Image (cartoon, grey):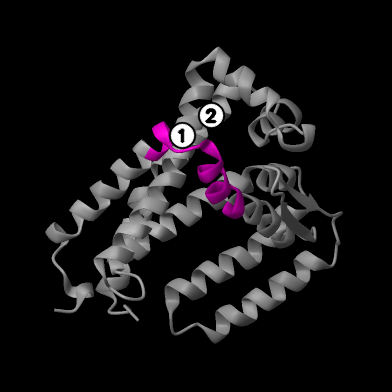
Amino acid sequence: MDMTDEPASRRWPWLLAGLAAAVLAHLFVPATFVWVLCAIPHEMGHATVGCWLGRPSSPAISVAGHAWSHVGELRSWLPWAILVVLLAVAWHRRVRRVQAVALAVFAVGSPLLAFTDAAPVAIAIGGHLGELAFAAWCYHMFWTGGHTGAFQERLACAIAGALLQVANLKLCLGLMTSPSARAHYASNGSLGLKNDYLVIAEDLCRCRLQSVAVLMLVVALAALPAGLLAGWLRERAGDTG
């Protein structure tokens, strides 16, 4: 039987196993392992949002346990170039309406956000959004069976998605409820820099760190249903290749 036609009742155990493995990893596996998995999509998130908003950006990850993204100055012509390119791609993909609409939204969003005060906020929050987007993609791959359809790939995708999602949920819950967690967060920024949620709360939005954590907790909770919904819709559309 094609694994993409597998009944949903036979998929859930692998998801539950992935969630359990992620919780155990956060309890017993050295934090460096989880940090590496989170750092890659995190810094790519910063760099991707920075480039999308007209600020050439590049991620860097150190073997010493530091991660940082260089975000360049705004190039005023770049958001308009991104608008033209993405609209052209959206027109080319117009047969696939969902993709075309998504590309058009991102195209229009580039110049709309790039020249406003919302751009630094979007770049700062882009790291954790990158982690959660990757987690959702992993859940999507779990549901559809990925490239092989084997249970091993389903399990690996479930574990990777859960590791990222649990890391974000754990961080947000700690910042919301624990003064010691907030103190630790304030002191452990890479290269002595402020961590993202502190930048958003103290420098950009002038709000409480706990408020940022509450908002991002809701976003983090959405990663699992968003990924599963995307996988379900892909199967419904018959696009399982």
In the image as oriented, which residue stretches furthest toward the top? 179
What residue span does the magenta drawing correspond to? 25-41
Residue 180 left/right relative to 21: right
Label 1 element class = helix
- Residue 42 drawn at (x, y percent): 60, 49
Asked which quadrant contains residue 82, the reply is bottom right
Q: Is residue 140 above or below residue 146?
A: above
Asked which quadrant contains residue 10, the reply is bottom left
Amino acid under label 2? Ala
Determine the residue positioned at 63% across, 25% down: 185
Q: Sort mark 1 into few (<14), some (14-19) or many (20+) by Cα contacts within 10 Å.
A: some
In depth, the one of 233 and 13 nearer the eye is: 13
Q: Sort mark 2 into few (<14), some (14-19) or many (20+) by Cα contacts within 10 Å.
A: many
Numbered circle sitting on residue 213? 2
Q: Is residue 175 above or below residue 234?
A: above
Determine the residue positioned at 62% across, 48% down: 126
Q: Which residue is mark 1?
A: 217
In depth, the one of 218 and 174 nearer the eye is: 174
Label 2 element class = helix
